[in-house]
Image: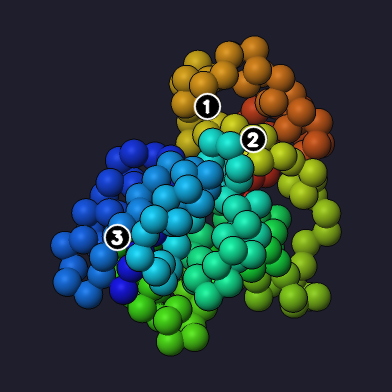
Amino acid sequence: MNIAIVEDNKIIREGLELYFKNDSKFSCDIAVDSVEAFLQSVRHSSKIDVVLLDINLPGMSGIEGIRHIKHQYPDVYIIMLTIYKDEKHVFDALKAGANGYLLKNTPLKSIKKGVLQILEEGAPISPLVAKKVINYFNPQKRNKEDGFEKLTSREIEVLQALSEGAPFKNIADQLFVTIDTVRYHSKNIYKKLNVNSKLGAVKKYLKKQD
């Protein structure tokens, strides 16, 4: 079974690549940091069975990439492997054609289980994500709009980093932007979530994750 990995975090990418290559049931011809690099490499590769695809990538996003990959290689299965667990990213990915959705904190053995499951017509989804999907379609448990649906992908990244206690400088370094840009995103987050401070935004975010 031939796995492709599209992940811009080098440590995660190389860890996944090594893990699958050390299993005789798998091969991994492609391990790249962008959708563009994947589309270039796949032309010269053996048939790919499953793509593990991140969402936040340099250049084309993973969600946009799903459409391009599926258009050119309709038989390829795509499993999102991402930090994003909010409804917007989940449903955008599934609507675009993703066959599974796993969070990056998923143990490697469970990722492998998901890959094997998908080839048997399964749909691997992290438990937390599955719960959100079920709640979304349960009218009694659906939350009213709370502002999170207005956040951009970058604002969600900033908010998640804030919830982990990262200072603005660290967030700026992590996202390769200036501190002023992080402050700008933060102000937009507070406005969209209808809160007055970082603490208020973090509390609201953490409560939503419960």
Q: CA distance from mark 1 to mark 2?
A: 9 Å
On screen, 87 above or below 156? below
Q: Is residue 26 visible?
A: yes
Give the Cα distance between marks 1 and 3: 28 Å
Q: Which amino acid is tagged 2?
A: Arg
The residue pinned by badge 2 equals: 154
The type of residue carrying mark 1 is Leu
**Extreme-bottom residue of the structure:** 120
Label disc, if present, on residue 28 of the rendered structure? 3
Q: Secondary structure at mark 3?
A: strand
User: What residue is at 43 percent from the left and 42 percent from the top?
Assistant: 33
Reading the chain from its start, which is encountered first: label 3 or label 2? 3
| Figure quadrant of residue 99 | bottom right
Residue at horizontal 50%, vertical 71%?
Answer: 77
Helix, strand or loop at disc 2? Answer: helix
Q: Would you say the residues marked 1 and 3 are in contact, meaning their CB atoms lie under 8 Å apart?
A: no
Query: Mark 2 and mark 1 in contact (Cβ < 8 Å)?
Result: yes
Residue 167 visible, this orientation: no
- Observer-side mark, 3 or 2, equals 3
Residue position marked by numbered label 1 in the rendering = 175
